[in-house]
Image (spheres, helix red, strand yellow):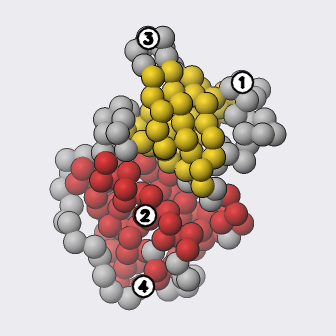
Amino acid sequence: MHIRAPAILVAARQHGETAVVARLLTEEYGLVAAYVAGGRGRQLRPVMIPGNVVDVQVSARSESQLPFAKVELLESRGQYLTEPLLAAAIGWVAALTATALPERQPYPSLHAALGGLLDAICHAPSARGWVGALLAYETLLLRELGYGGAGARPEGDLSALMKEMDVLAGPLDHYLLADRRGDVMAARARLRELLGRIE
């Protein structure tokens, strides 16, 4: 297997002293897991931040082997992680994507939607500019994985969007995250708490 493509980094888990196992969402190949040597080193640590867009080269000798990856930063979202609300939003959508999607199945609409959502989170003047897009992404994820979900983007004031967010928590937890290791929904609960302070 040999892949070269732009990708959204959605997870980076420590492996050994200096390496990282990364999960990267590409448009053409879907979610790809790969070993990044030196991923925790001084040069690559700022690159291996969930939410970043990277150019990735992935290669493996066999289908059963965890591929090796070389990554190069295309767009950093690291500067937005100093703001707790933005960090919580980026962390949640990255963790949800990394956990819910099966590997190596392309979902071009999800790739495009996640890229747009991350741009909105980072560049909208306030949360009111991206909460609707976040709920639309969660709904699209449910629909793409076969669990229904309406196609329309949720609208309304922040209070109405928070009610919609509360309604979506059940399907996300039940259908997408029920059998997963770790409490991914805790990241969403943290985001909901921070949004509640500005509601």
- Kindly identify the residue that appears in the image at 55 percent across and 60 percent down: 90
Mark closer to the observer (3, 1): 3
x and y percentages locating residue 160 in the rendered image: 35, 84
Q: In this image, 143 relative to 137: left or right?
A: left
x and y percentages locating residue 171 in the rendered image: 29, 56
Q: Quadrant of the N terminus?
A: top left
**Looking at the image, is mark 3 or mark 1 earlier in the sequence?**
1
As helix, strand or loop, the secondary structure at mark 2 comes to helix
**Looking at the image, is mark 3 or mark 2 earlier in the sequence?**
3
Q: Where is 31 relative to 126, above or below?
A: above
> Would you call the spot at circle 1 few (<14 residues within 10 Å), some (14-19), or many (20 or more)?
few
Q: Which residue is mark 1?
A: 16
- Kindly identify the residue that appears in the image at 68 percent across and 70 percent down: 83
- Kindly identify the residue that appears in the image at 36 percent across and 31 percent down: 104
Disc 2/disc 4 C-alpha distance (Å)? 20 Å
x and y percentages locating residue 62 in the rendered image: 44, 11
Disc 4/disc 3 C-alpha distance (Å)? 49 Å
As helix, strand or loop, the secondary structure at mark 1 comes to loop
At label 3, which amino acid type do we have?
Answer: Ser
Disc 1/disc 2 C-alpha distance (Å)? 33 Å
Of 175 and 96, the residue lying toward us: 96
Q: Which residue is mark 4?
A: 158
At label 2, which amino acid type do we have?
Answer: Gly
Q: Where is 181 relative to 86, above or below?
A: above
**Looking at the image, is mark 4 or mark 3 earlier in the sequence?**
3
> Would you call the spot at circle 4 few (<14 residues within 10 Å), some (14-19), or many (20 or more)?
some
Disc number for residue 62? 3
Give the image quarter of residue 150.
bottom left
Q: In this image, 175 relative to 24: left or right?
A: left
Q: Which residue is mark 2?
A: 116
